[in-house]
Amino acid sequence: MSLVINKAEVLHRPDSRQQNRPMQFCSGYSLNGRYWILLLGLVVLFFTGGLTWASDAIPDAVDAAEQTIAAKPAPVLGPSDYRQIGSMSSRSFVWVIAQLHLFLAAFVLAVPLFVTVIEWIGVKTGDQRYDDMAHEFMKVSMTAYSLTALFGGTLALALFLLYPTFMAYMMEVFGNQVMVYALLFFLESGVLYIYYYSWYALRYGNRKYLHLSLGVLLNGVGTTLLFVANSWATFMMAPSGVDDGGAVTGNIWEIMRGPLWNPLNLHRFVANIAFGGAVVGAYAGYQLLSARTMAQRAHYDWMGYTSNFIAVLAFLPLPFAGYWLMAEIYAYSQQMGITAMGGILAWLFIVQAVLIGTILLAANYYLWNGMSRCEGSRRYTWLIKYIAITLVGSFLIWVTPHTLILSAKEIAALGGAHHPILGPFGIMPAKNIAVNLMLIGTFLSFQLYRRADKEITVPWAGFGNALMVAIYIIAIANVIFLGVYYGYFTNTVYKVGSSVAQVVSTLIVIISGVTIDSLMFKGARTLPTTWGKISNRGVYALFALPIAFTWLMALMGYVRSSVRTHWHVYTVMKDNSVDNFIPSIGHAANMMTIATISFLLLVLFIFWVASLGETRQKKPIN
Amino acid sequence: MTTQNTLSQNTESIQHSGLPVIVKVLAFMVILVLVFTGIANLLPQVEGQAPKETKVDLGALTMASYIAMGEQLFKGKGTCTLCHNDLGRAPNILALDMVATAKKHFGSDGYKGEAKDSEDYFRESMLEPSKYIVPGFGKQGEPSPMPVINKAPIALSDIEIGAIIAFLQAKDGGQPTIALPTDVPAENNQSSASSAPPEVAKNAQAVLTKNGCPACHTVLESTATIGPNLKAVSQRLSREKIRESIINPGAVIAEGYPPVMPTDFADKMMVKELEMVVDFLAQAGQKSATETEQKGE
Amino acid sequence: MIKNWVFSFLIAFLVFYAVDHAIMSMQGLPLNIDMTPAQ
C-alpha cells in the first residue's frame, strides 16, 4: 500500500463531464484504492465515537442544568391548553401533516440507503448501468428532501400552536436533544448536496470510494435523525426516565432508551427501505409503460425489477420486526398490547392483513409475470399455481376475524359470538401459520425467478436441490405443526412462544435458500433475459405496491396513536382535548386516504420536477 | 439479476393508444385506495371513548347499586375483560365462582400472599398482582402481567376497587363482606370549617365558657384562683386594660399570679366576642360589687 | 438419487427439531422429547 499517482486513471478518464482541473489532494497525489477502507472506517469511528462521547457529555450537561431547576411533574391539561384553527379539528390537521411528513421522510431516508448499495454493486460488477440507475434514483428524490423539510416545519409549528402545553412538557423532557436534531439537518443537507452534485466529479477509481463514503455518511446521519425522532413517539407510548407523575428523573439516554425505542428503530429503518423501493418502482413502472422505444422499455423494466427486488427483500423481515415491536408492547403493558390486538383495535389488524396480502400478492404477481423475460423459467412455472393457492388460502385465513359483530338474533342462530368453523381461524395461531406460509411462498417465487435464467453446473446439484426441497417441505410442516398443536392444544404461553419458532423456521428457509443458491450458482451458465418482455398487466403490480405500503404505513400510524388511548403520554399525561377518543376505523381510513392521495400527488410533482430538469426546449429556428 | 446482452440498443418504437398512461395509472392507484377505504368503512365502527369522571353520591349508595357499579367498572373503566375472558390469558372471572376460587387459592400450599378471606384476596390481586400468580398463567420467574389497578393507566380509586370486590363477591349468589364506603369524617370537618362562615357566640357568658376562662378565673359560676378574680376586675382595670389583658396577657401580669394565661385569644376570638367580654367584665365588677354588698360578703 | 433425498430430509428434520427445542427452551418453555410441553 503506497501513495501512488494512478497514471492509468489520470490518462484514461472516459467521461467528458469531468472538469479539466480535477480535484486533487495534497500536491497531486491521490489515495490508493485500498485506503477507502480507512476512510470508511474513519466515518464509522466518527459516528460511534461521536455518539459515545455525546452519550457521556449530554447527560452531564443535562444533570448540571437540572441541578438548578427542580423537575416538574407533567401538567394536567384543561381546555385552555388546546387551540384550534377555526372550527377544524386540531387532531385531524396534525394527523395529515404528520403523516405526509412521515411518508416523505421515509422516502428520503430510504433512497440513499439503496442508492449507496446499488452504487457499490456498480463498482463491484464494473457495470456502469448500476451507477446510472443509482444516480437517477438520487435525482428523483432531491425535491422530496425539501418537501420533507417543509412538512416537518409545518408540523412543528402546528404542534406548538395547537398543543402548546403538551409541547412545553415534551421540551422539558427532551431538552437539548431537539436542538441536536435540528443541527443534524445541517450535516444531512450538506452531505446530501455534496453526495448528489459530486456524482460525476467523483466517478472513477479512488474518488469513487470517497463518493461511496459520502453515501455511507449520509445514511449514518439520516439514520441518526430517524432514531432521534423515534424517541419522541416511543416516549409518548412507553415513557421512561420519568417518575409516575411525569417529572424527569433520568438523563436523556434513559428517556430515549425506552422499551419500544429500538424495536421501532429497527422496524422503521427496514420498512423505510421497503417503502422507498416501492415508490421508485412505481416511477420505473410508469416510465416503462410510457416508453417510446424498446430500449427505454428495457431500461425501465430492469429498473422496476431492481426496485421491486429491494422492496420485497426489505419487506420479508418486516413482520419479524413488527412482531418484536408488538412483543415489547405486550411486555411493557399487557393492557396496551391487548387493546391493540384483542380489544378495540383488533379489526384494524384485519385491515392490515388485507394490505399485507395485497403487498405479497402484488409482489409475487410481478415476479411470476417477470418470468416471461427468460425462457429458462418454463421449468418452474408449474409451481406458480401452488404458490398462488397457498397465498390466497393463507390470505383468506389471515383476514378471517375472530369476534364478529352480530345482532342478538344472529348470536342466537350462531350459538355464540364466534363462528363454529371459521372462529378458530380468527386467533393468532392460525394467522401466524398463514403469514409464515405466505412469506415462504413469496421467497419461493423469488428463488424460482433467480434460478430461471441459470443453468446450474456444480457437481453436487442433485444433493443441493434435494436439500432445498426438503428444507421447504419440513419448514412448512413445522410451521403448521407449531401453529396447530401449540396454538390450540396447549396453554397461552406455549402458544405465544411457538410463534417465535415459526418465524425462525421461515428465516431458515430464506437464509438457507440464499446460501445454497449462491453456492450452487458458482460457474453456472446464464441464459438470455429479454428485459422489457413483461406484460403491461404485470407492471401494474408496481403501482399496487406503493399504494398498499403507503396506506399501510398510515394505518400503523393510526394504531400507534390509538394504542395510547386517552393519554398524550401514556400513564403520565392525560389527553383532555375534545378529541381524546380513539376515532372509528372508518373515520381513520378517510383521513389516511386523504394523506395517501395527497402523497400520491406530491410524488407526481416530485417526479415531474425531476424530469423537468432534463427537459430542453428546442431553440426556435429564427 | 443478469443484464448481459439484452438491455439492447433496440430503438424500435412503441405505439401508444387509448388513454394516456398517467390517467390509467392514477385511476388504478386511486381506485385501489378507495377499495381499502371502503373495506375499512364497511367494518363495525367503534369509537374508543375516554373514561368519564363520575361523582359517587355516597349518601345514596346501597349495596345493590355498589355491586352494579362494580360490574360496570369490571366491564368498562377497569378494562378487566381485556384479559379475564375465555381466551386463556387470565382466569375467566365471569365464568368462575370467584368466592370459592379465591378460597381455593389463598388456602393452597403455593399461596404466598397475606389474604385471609376473599375480600383481602381480591384486593391483593388488584393492588399487588405479583404476590401470587394462579398456576397455569403467566411466565415462570417473571412478575405478573396484570397491571396494578390503582395506578395509571387504570387508576381506580379505593371506592371503585371496593365496588369491584363487592361485585366479585356477589355475582355468584354470595353476600358481599365488604363494607359500603362512607363519608370520611375528617374530610367533612375540614370542608365545613373552611366553607361555612364562623358563628359568633350568643353572649359574653358563651364566649367566656367557649374560651375556658372559668378554668383559671373566678367568673360566672367558677371559683378558680389560678388567675385574678374577674368578678371585680372593673374596679382594678379600665376597659382598655381589660382588653389588653385578654389579647396580650404578658403585657401586665397581676402581682402574685403566674404568667400562664394563653396568648392566642387574639387569633381565636372574633372582634365582636372580645367586645362582648370586655363590656361584660367592665360592668360585671360593678354589678358583683353591688351583689357582694347586698349579700353582705 | 434416493440417497440424496433421504439424507436431505433427515438433515432438514433434525435441524428443525433441534431449532424447535432450542427456541422454546430459550423462552422458558421447555419441551419433552415428543414435543409436548414439559411444564
Image: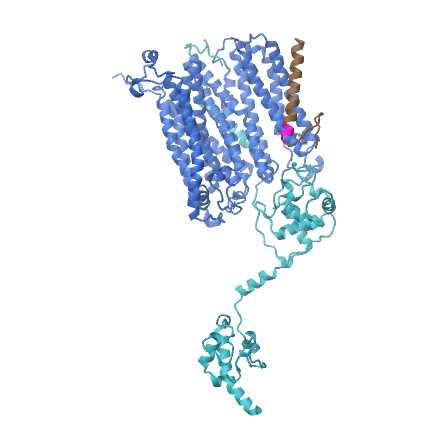
Chain colours: A blue, B cyan, C brown
Give the position of the C terminus of chain A as an image quadrant: top left
* Percent of width and height locating residue A209: 39, 19
Asked if one can make out residue A602 in the rendered structure from this viewpoint, the answer is no
Judged left or right of residue A13, residue B77 is right
Residue A80 belongs to the span the image colors magenta:
no
Residue sitting nearer the eye, C14 or B167: C14
Query: At 32% from the left edge and 11% from the top edge, which residue is drawn?
Result: A11
Residue sitting nearer the eye, A530 or A128: A128
Task: Examine the image and state in which quarter residue A341 appears.
Answer: top right
* Percent of width and height locating residue A128: 41, 14
Query: At 57% from the left edge and 17% from the top edge, which residue is drawn?
Result: A513
Judged left or right of residue B287, residue B175 is right
Q: Give the answer, above or below, for where B17 lies relative to A428.
A: above
Residue sitting nearer the eye, B202 or A6: A6
Residue sitting nearer the eye, A443 or A185: A185
Q: Give the answer, above or below, for where A28 lies relative to B50.
A: above
Asked if one can make out residue A32 in the rendered structure from this viewpoint, the answer is yes
* Percent of width and height locating residue B210: 56, 74
* Percent of width and height locating residue A309: 50, 20
- Magenta span: C23-27
Give the position of the N terminus of chain A as an image quadrant: top left
Query: At 54% from the left edge and 27% from the top edge, which residue is drawn?
Result: A318
Query: At 45% from the left edge and 21% from the top edge, which residue is drawn?
Result: A117
